[in-house]
Image (spheres, grey):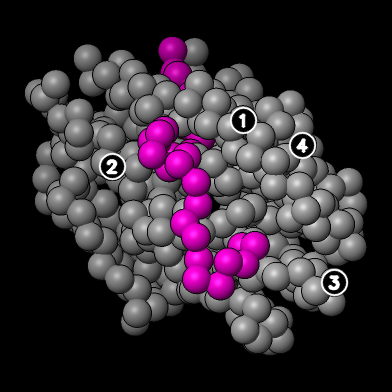
Amino acid sequence: MMQSNNKILMIIADSHSPDARLTKEINSLFDNGYNVDVICWDRENKHLLPPYKSEKHGEVFRYKLPSKRGNPALFILNIGRFYLFAIKKSKLKKYTIIHAHSIQVLIVAVFLKFFLKLKLIYDVHEVTETFGNNLITGLGKLFWQIEKLFLPFVDGIITATDPLTDRYKNKIKKNGNVISVLNCLPFIERNFIGRSINSEDKFIIGRIGNLRNKSRIDIIAEVINILIQRKLNVKLILAGTNIAGYELKSKNIIDSLGDFVEYHDWIPLDKFKDYYGLFDIVINIHEKGDVYEEKYAYFSKVFESISFGVPVVINDFPTMTNFVNDNEVGFVIKNISAKDFADQIEFLIKHPNIKNEMRGNCLKVSKDIINWKIMEERLLKLYSTLIS
């Protein structure tokens, strides 16, 4: 149903194109009568970054100024310049709601709320997305203190996980709403008809998502090598943009696997089916040790994987272990051990009936518990509350 006051401005301190969460929110809002413009900061300044191809939004104002992750001093220096850019562009149209993505843009969003007389939604992505362990002792801790000062001016909060929703419920003004919008995909039943048969008929192990030190690609490579040594016919398909200079380490790791790996820098949302449709399983090894991450973060790639009927093999992680075990959509490895991962994957290779049972469980979970339609309803309810 078309909204009478439907002009929305989203601001994100990141390049617009690769963000699947942002894409899904924009598409859902457009399909329900909202018009969304986006102000974004292309911090990586990638020459090969593809344009955002969609007819489901208004204008995209992209600010190109290098400030790569892993360089907090450069980030602090340049974010003020991005704020000025955002203020300038926000005055071009009359908006109803400003939708700020992540803590990096909360300050300028609060300013624009009062300057332009708007409602403000604060969209919390991942708590350690930018600052990592610094949330405990460093720059991130300071930013969280600053966040507390601005939360009373927020009209609604969207979080990426249920634990984060609980965290923010007591920090927003009394009449504000806090909801979780999990980074999952729509339920599409045809995604579950079975994976494509590749010409080599290998057991395909997949991983899609940004690559950083905590991603432990080194352990994944070790797992593949163990399986190769055991004469198992496997292949790794890996896709993800390197973050904070990680390509210096990951390139050698990936190259060491030779023909047993296929690597792609980035896969857009509309191409996910082409890749998940090939996977027998998805592997996700994420280093532990960050108190806040272990308390608040989800593996959104697990949700994506089960949306295509692909079981997962992950390491034990506080917020994800029970979800995977209780719904029987994969296996959780207690320790980050290459041998233990290899043993479990070999078990699945030799027991395809177990993998197929897990595929059925993925269908049930994706249909009834975790899918974008459920999240879209939460998003639209929040918007309708603020616009009415």
Q: Which residue is mark 4?
A: 321
Identity of the amino acid at label 1?
Asn
Identity of the amino acid at label 4?
Thr
Q: Which residue is mark 2?
A: 26
Is residue 71 visible in this depiction of the protein?
no
Q: Position of residue 316 (x, y in %)?
A: 82, 44
Q: Which residue is mark 3?
A: 230
Q: Are marks 1 and 2 in contact (CB under 8 Å)?
A: no
Q: Residue at x 54, y 41 (%)?
A: 309
Magenta stretch: helix, strand or loop mostly: loop
Report helix, strand or loop for mark 4: helix
Single out the mark in the foreground, 1 or 2.
1
**Mark 4 or mark 1: which comes first in sequence?**
4
Q: Residue at x 31, y 24 (%)?
A: 380
Report helix, strand or loop for mark 1: helix
| Residue at mark 1 to residue at mark 3: CA–CA distance | 29 Å
